[in-house]
Amino acid sequence: MRQTLPMGEFADGIVDSGGVEIAVRDYGGDGPPLVLVHGNGLSLASFDAMVPHLRDRFRLVSYDIRRQGLSGEGPFTWDTALADLEAVITHFGLDAPAIAGHSLGGMIAALYGGTDRPCRAAVNLDGHGLGIGIPADDPGEAATRARLKALSDEAVDSHFNPIPAAALDAQFASIPEDKREAVRASTMRQLVQQPDGSFRLRLTRESIDEVMDAVNGTDLFDVYRDCKCPLLIVNATKNDPSIAAQSPEMAELMPARRATLAENLRQLADSNHHIEVVEVDATHGLIAEIPEELSKIVAGFIARTPESAVD
C-alpha cells in the first residue's frame, strides 16, 4: 500500500495487534519500505529530525511501541514486540521492508531480522543493552552488570517525579518559536496529565522493568549473529556528559565498557559477512545529534542490500 503525501505532512492511525492498539504514522513515499522503531521511553516523534532526510528516499512508516507514546496497554516481551511490528508491516502492505530502530528499537530490528519474516535489512542505532561481547556468566562481567543495573535503577526512579505544568510551559517557552510546536507535540506524546494539572511520564516503572527484563536477559551478540538479513550496527562512541551528573560511578565505568564494546563489534563484523558496523562521534542520543549524517548512513546501507532477505 503506497501513499503520496505532500512533503512535511503525514497520516496518523491505529493498527490492531492482538487486541492492543498500536499508534502508527505514515509519511508516504514511493521508495523501498522502511519502518522506524523508537527507543524505550520515547515515541515515534523521536525520529522527527531524521524524517526529512529519509522520506524522499523511502516508503516511510513509524509507530509507538506498546505501552508508550499513544499506543495501548499490553504485556511487553520480545514476542509481543515482534508481533506489533509485523502487524504494522501487514497493515501497510509493506513487502520485505528494512527495519531501522534506535536503542530498544534497534534491538527489535535485529531480532526481527532473525525471524523467517521477509526483511531487506535491519539497522540498529546504538541499541546494545548491557552486553558488550563478554559472556554474562564471566564473574567480573556479571558483577559489573549487576552494579550497572543497580545504578540504572537508582537513576530511573527520579524520572517518575511529577512535572509541574508551569515548569513544562517554561521549558517550551525557552525553545525557538519556529521549533516550539514540534517539540511540544513530541514531548506531550510521552506525558500524561494528572488530576492536579501536573504531568507524569506515560511510561510506568512497571513498563520499564518489563522492557529491561527482556533486554538484560538477551545476549545481543547472539542476536546479531543469528540475523538472517544484512545488519547494520551504528555504534555511538561518545560518552554522554549528562551521565556524570546522574551517577559519577556509572560515568567512570562506561568509557572502558564502550571501548570493549567497540572492539568486540569490529571483530563481530570481521567474522560475519552479513554484519556491518559503523562508528559515529555522537552519544546515545545520536538520532537528534547527527540526523543528516545518520540518515545518509542508513540510506546508503539499505541501498547496498538486495531487495529481499538473504540467508
Image: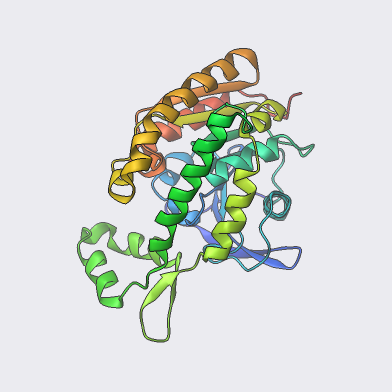
Q: 95 above or below 166?
A: above
* Residue 147: image location, x then y, percent: 48, 43
Q: Quadrant of residue 129?
A: top right
From the top left corner, tell me how far across and down residue 100 is, in percent: 56, 39
User: In the picture, residue 117 is in which quadrant?
Assistant: top right
What number of labels is visible? 0
Residue 205 appears in view: yes
> Is residue 234 shown above or below 7?
above
Quadrant location of the C terminus in the rendered image:
top right
Quarter-wise, where is residue 208 in the image? Answer: bottom right
Q: Locate residue 35, reporting x and y percent.
A: 59, 45
Q: Is residue 29 visible?
A: no
Residue located 38% across and 62% down the image? 158
Q: Is residue 199 left or right of residue 44?
A: left
Q: Nearer the viewer, residue 249 or 242?
A: 249
* Left/right of residue 220 with respect to residue 39 in the rendered view: right
Between 114 and 36, the one nearer to me in the picture: 114
Tell me: residue 2, above or below residue 219: below
Residue 200 in the image: state x and y as whole percent.
Answer: 42, 71
Spot the residue most to the right: 116
| Figure check: 47 above or below 293 | below
